[in-house]
Image (spheres, rainbow, N blue to C red):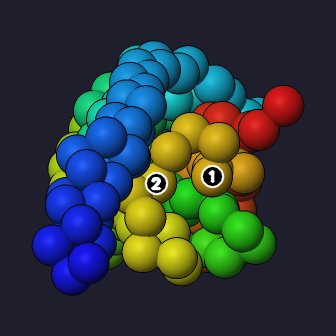
């Protein structure tokens, strides 16, 4: 009797193993703008175990900006949680017209510990903050992806 139970267990494992999970690959190239800034060729690539984000440029839509502070922050929103995925801050007297967007690559996990999929992402946006020539702090948000 014990031998029959052991054989049934082996048969169950062999014949009822779970099916392979679906593999999804997404590659988005985004260009978006706000009143003063334009983001060109921002890339979002989602593979089963890797999330790649970045590349492209942030460009001022007017000639040049003279500022003592500039910050670009890219944020991913999933299940109402915000995660900053890239940030660049520059200080000091500078002229700004064109900024490279850095690239990040690696696994991004959901709260459940699963690798993130496009369906998990509610929103990706950039927040650009700078000081104008009067020293006032100005912020603009640029939506890069929104779940539709």
Quarter that holds the N terminus: bottom left
Disc sitting over residue 120 in the figure: 1
Compared across the picture, whether 102 is left or right of 83 comes to left
The relative height of residue 23 versus residue 28 in the rendered view (above or below) is below
SS category of the residue bearing label 2: loop
The residue lying furthest to the right in this view is 148
Q: Of 21 and 74, which appears nearest the observer? A: 21
Residue drawn at point x = 65 percent, y = 62 percent: 77
Identify which residue, 101 or 3, lies in the foreground. Answer: 3
Give the x, y percent position of residue 44.
41, 33
Give coordinates of residue 13: x percent, y percent: 27, 55
Quadrant of the image for the C terminus? top right
Q: CA distance from mark 1 to mark 2?
A: 6 Å
- Give the side of residue 38 with respect to residue 43, left or right: right
Q: Is residue 142 above or below residue 42?
A: below
Whether residue 66 can be seen here: no
Q: Is residue 53 above or below residue 6?
A: above
Q: Is residue 32 visible?
A: yes
Residue at (56, 39) in percent of width and height: 118
Position in image of residue 144 (x %, y %): 62, 36
Cβ atoms under marks 1 and 2 closer than 8 Å: yes
Other residues around mark 2 within 10 Å, as few (<14) / some (14–19) / many (≥20)? many
**Residue at x 72%, y 51% (from the top left corner):** 122
Q: Residues within 10 Å of mark 1 (few under 14, many from 20)?
A: some
Which element type, helix, strand or loop, lies under badge 1?
helix
Q: Residue at x 54, y 78 (%)?
A: 111
Disc 2: which residue: 116
Q: Position of residue 101 (x, y in %)?
A: 30, 42
* Observer-nearest of 147 and 20: 20
Residue 89 is marked as: none
Camera-nearest residue between 113 and 136: 113
């Amino acid at each position: 009797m014990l031998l029959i139970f052991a054989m049934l267990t082996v048969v169950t494992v062999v014949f009822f193993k779970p099916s392979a999970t679906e593999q999804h690959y997404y590659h988005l190239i985004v260009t978006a703008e706000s009143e003063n800034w334009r983001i060109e060729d921002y890339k979002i690539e989602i593979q089963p175990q890797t999330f790649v984000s970045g590349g492209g440029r942030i460009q001022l839509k007017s000639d040049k900006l003279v500022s003592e502070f500039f910050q670009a922050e890219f944020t991913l929103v999933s299940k109402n949680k915000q995660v900053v995925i890239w940030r660049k801050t520059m200080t000091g007297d500078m002229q700004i017209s064109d900024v490279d967007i850095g690239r990040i690559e690696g696994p991004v996990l959901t709260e459940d510990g699963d690798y993130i999929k496009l369906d998990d992402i509610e929103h990706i946006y950039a927040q650009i903050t700078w000081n104008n020539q009067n020293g006032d702090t100005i912020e603009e948000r640029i939506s890069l992806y929104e779940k539709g």
